[in-house]
Image (cartoon, rainbow, N blue to C red):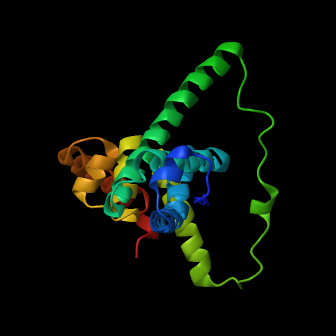
């Protein structure tokens, strides 16, 4: 979580941000942090990259739009987040081209986080928990294979509960495009996740 410090050495913040604004930004960032991480993680498939994207998005929101009305932060933040995800896709595409050119594959030093492999001992397994976990994993896998724009439209509309207009601003496209991408995403997910629907 990025905590804003009213005593920050950034001159702009010293002069213009009140303690109430700082607290409001802290509350907003805390409210979107986990979901934003999840969106970025689904898009990238990498926890470290997802965390970098979310932190960069939060910092950009604070620096550029912290003085805006609190009601504007949601769509602005998601627009920044989606732009950072698209930037990540572009950079990854370029890196992968170079790796293929030089004959190297994925980074060899990437290992799975050992903490992620440890089972959660605080809850007893049950049929419902197992079914929910399987459905969640199936949904994440299905979301990862969607085209990026469909993935963005679905996550912003269904997960973040943004309306069509807010989603269009976040994605930088028309409302008609949002509806089309969302419809196609839902149709694909219904086909792929047929066994997991209730």
Q: Is residue 188 above or below residue 194?
A: above
Q: Is residue 122 left or right of residue 17?
A: right
Q: Is residue 195 left or right of residue 53?
A: left
Nearer to us in this view, 5 or 35 = 5
Does the rendering let one see residue 22?
yes
Nearer to us in this view, 138 or 2 = 2
Residue drawn at point x = 53 percent, y = 52 percent: 14
Nearer to us in this view, 23 or 101 = 23
Nearer to us in this view, 121 or 91 = 91
Q: Is residue 45 above or below residue 24?
A: above
Q: Residue 71's quadrant in the figure?
A: bottom left
Does the rendering let one see residue 57?
no
Residue drawn at point x = 39 percent, y = 63 percent: 160
The picture places residue 107, in percent across and down from the top left corner, at 74, 32
Residue drawn at point x = 41 percent, y = 71 percent: 197
Q: Is residue 147 above or below residue 4?
A: above
Residue drawn at point x = 56 percent, y = 62 percent: 137
The picture places residue 184, in percent across and down from the top left corner, at 29, 50
Residue with the most extreme front position:
15
Q: Residue 163's quadrant in the figure?
A: bottom left
Quadrant placement of the C terminus: bottom left
């Amino acid at each position: 979580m990025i905590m804003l410090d009213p005593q920050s050495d950034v001159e702009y913040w010293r002069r213009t941000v009140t303690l109430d604004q700082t607290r409001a930004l802290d509350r907003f960032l805390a409210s979107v942090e986990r979901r934003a991480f999840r969106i970025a993680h689904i898009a990238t498939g990498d926890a470290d990259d997802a965390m970098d994207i979310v932190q960069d998005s939060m910092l950009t929101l604070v620096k550029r739009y912290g003085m805006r009305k609190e009601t504007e932060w949601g769509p602005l933040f998601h627009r920044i987040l989606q732009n950072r995800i698209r930037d990540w896709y572009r950079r990854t595409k370029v890196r992968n081209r170079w790796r293929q050119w030089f004959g190297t594959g994925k980074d060899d030093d990437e290992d799975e986080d050992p903490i992620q492999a440890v089972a959660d001992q605080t809850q007893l397994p049950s049929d419902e928990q197992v079914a929910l976990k399987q459905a969640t994993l199936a949904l994440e896998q299905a979301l990862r294979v969607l085209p990026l724009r469909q993935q963005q439209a679905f996550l912003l509309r269904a997960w973040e509960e943004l309306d069509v207009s807010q989603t269009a601003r976040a994605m930088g496209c028309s409302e008609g495009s949002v509806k089309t991408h969302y419809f196609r995403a839902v149709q694909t997910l219904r086909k792929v996740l047929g066994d997991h629907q209730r």
